[in-house]
Amino acid sequence: MISSDASHPINGAPRGLSILGATGSIGTQTLDIVRLFPDRLRVHALTAHANADLLVAQALEFRPNCVVLGDETARKTVEEALAGTGIRVLMGSEGLCEASTLPEVDTVVAAVVGFAGLEPVLAAIRAGKRIALANKETLVVAGALVNQLLHTHNATLIPVDSEHSAIFQCLVGETAHSVRRLILTASGGPFRTRPKEDFARITLAEALQHPNWSMGAKITVDSATMMNKGLEVIEARWLFDLGADQIDVLVHPQSIIHSMVEFTDGSTKAQLGVPDMKVPIQYALSYPQRWPAPHERIDWTTLRALDFEMPDVEKFPSLQLAYAVLRKGGTAPAVLNAANEQAVALFLNEQLRFVEIPRMIEAALDALPVTEATYDALVQADAAARRLVLEHARAVVH
Amino acid sequence: MISSDASHPINGAPRGLSILGATGSIGTQTLDIVRLFPDRLRVHALTAHANADLLVAQALEFRPNCVVLGDETARKTVEEALAGTGIRVLMGSEGLCEASTLPEVDTVVAAVVGFAGLEPVLAAIRAGKRIALANKETLVVAGALVNQLLHTHNATLIPVDSEHSAIFQCLVGETAHSVRRLILTASGGPFRTRPKEDFARITLAEALQHPNWSMGAKITVDSATMMNKGLEVIEARWLFDLGADQIDVLVHPQSIIHSMVEFTDGSTKAQLGVPDMKVPIQYALSYPQRWPAPHERIDWTTLRALDFEMPDVEKFPSLQLAYAVLRKGGTAPAVLNAANEQAVALFLNEQLRFVEIPRMIEAALDALPVTEATYDALVQADAAARRLVLEHARAVVH
């Protein structure tokens, strides 16, 4: 039943990559994979928001066609550092969209954090690219739109998130309509065992201590509120075309089982591994093949148990908010996402307390109307939600 | 990445089944699956060794083309009971081979226990059938021969054993050469926590108490000695065409993870379920599809942990014997299998103690020469090993 090795999409030539968000956690780990497979992967574009020094260092090592910078203030530094290399320096969202659609690019690694990551992904889809998707907002905010475009332009979305990669891996070779439900595992974050009464005293430093995964600050806080899992439920709904009632969350503190699929015949499949994003990143680049790599493996001689518990929705209301917006549909997920981004930004800036994050989101969802999810409506909902959270936050803090 | 529903092999007509060993544990559960899917499965042949009453009842319910009986003494009873039904009554290994090769049969469920199950499987392979394999000995004794015949006759072998079914399910859709190793899980049997010093006092009744699975007596004893797992290691070597050093055993007392595959890229996939043979039996019949069925599912709201430990090779020497015969090759696995069958038969008859089972096997392996595994050599090795165990057992007991 093992299919013969699928031939390489471009006849043995390296797969051309554009890495959006190259200086972030996913971007730098993607470049680690490129270093492991220099004959199979070739970088044509690298983009960064403002980390000019790292972007320049990456450009000098990987020699892409172009780099893209989000922050205008660093432009000169980058242009001077790359002068004479032939590497073009592009700017802003226009540059991002060019990087996503270069003809020599086969796969776009979409690892820009937040709503800003949506537009270049839509451009890549329209160009029929394969997209290795690490940006949650693309599907959370615009899942219906994205699925429609994927279908029209025959583009492929491969998840990079460890949970969705796990489900994707469990589904290869399975026939349609064989899924009963998905079980997204969650570490439970740093506050899994903290009593609810103590949540009001949670500090920023505590929220940034994830027990298993090393990730960016925003995602680490999302993991502490469990909004991360809520966003993943929404993503899974679109990635795998299932109803919200077919997606469950199970707390598994060791993060060894990355997620599971329960099939209609009673069988369940799980994908497992040590918490290391390099494995799902590599899989998104090698799929449908697997490439031998020295990533750390599970050591079953020392691993004695995998533990499970149901999520505590009293302590983590964000999870229920995510299910609620899936039921509401339209622009509701965009409001949830934007309100969360804004609230987490304020928390990271120590302008909001931890417990206020879900309250801000709930208030925004209550205040803003749900409309049809056109691109313009999504942009407006995003902006309105952010404004509302800023207003509410000012009222709370001062 | 989900493939579209594979069309039914015979254009929507039910899949034609021949069930070899219909009155045993696997056979009766296979008929339970047929009862669930009367439109998709049709029984054309049923075979039994000596359980005439049950065979007759099954024949009257499922109306096959023929039944096959192993034991001549029950012939008359069956012929009389089925007189006027049009159901033919065939006898012995000739009858088994006819049942395996009927033109209307698409899938042969091979659930005859022991060496006797080999010949009809070889006949089914030569007839190009799909074989749902529950008989361990086919691959343990004649793995090389079977693989060569499968290739020549374009037949398909689908494992029914929960462990091998798990691996098979983890491998669908994966490309060749992507497997680093298989991890066969083992419950550890009823004596996992019993101290080695107490093994000499193990009784037959204790050995027949399996903690998780309800199976036939022979397999239950094999599970208690862990020879069951040793035989599965040998089967896995042939089913998945891997080296003995790529197959490991991990004790997992709950039997929820049925086995795992570790891939070359560091990812691991597992198949899970409550211990219920109906799920792998059904999968072998529905593959590559899955059919919705009301089999019991894992209840994650009550399951709190999955535990693991390394097997204790001091307490369970049978496991090491299995790896040893894989390295020896030729007729060595046939000797191991026959010596084990004979020793377990004596133990079930209370003519041998539990701890003597592996000693008998080791003595047979030491005494008998390893030759090339032709069919005739396998038959001779089988007979010689049984004789030797009977001789040794007489020496021990009296």
Image: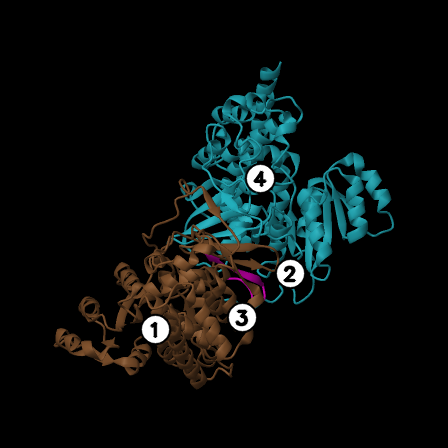
Chain colours: A cyan, B brown
Q: Chain of mark 2?
A: A
Mark number for residue A137? Answer: 4
Residue neighbourhood size for the residue with mark 4, other residues' Cα within 10 Å, grouped as few (<14), some (14–19), many (≥20): many
Disc 3 to disc 2: CB gap under 8 Å: no
Residue for point 80% across, 52% down = A61
Looking at the picture, tell me which residue is in the foreground, A182 or A301.
A301
Callout in the foreground (1, 3): 3
| Magenta-tinted stretch | B173-187
Separation of marks 4 and 3 at Cα, in angstroms:
54 Å
Mark number for residue A51? Answer: none
Q: For this view, does A365 lie left or right of residue B107? A: right
Residue A387: x, y in percent?
A: 59, 24
Quadrant including the C terminus of chain A? top right
Residue at the disc numbered 1: B106
Residue neighbourhood size for the residue with mark 3, other residues' Cα within 10 Å, grouped as few (<14), some (14–19), many (≥20): some
Mark number for residue A292? Answer: 2
Q: For this view, does B89 lie left or right of residue A39? A: left
Type of the residue with mark 2: Pro
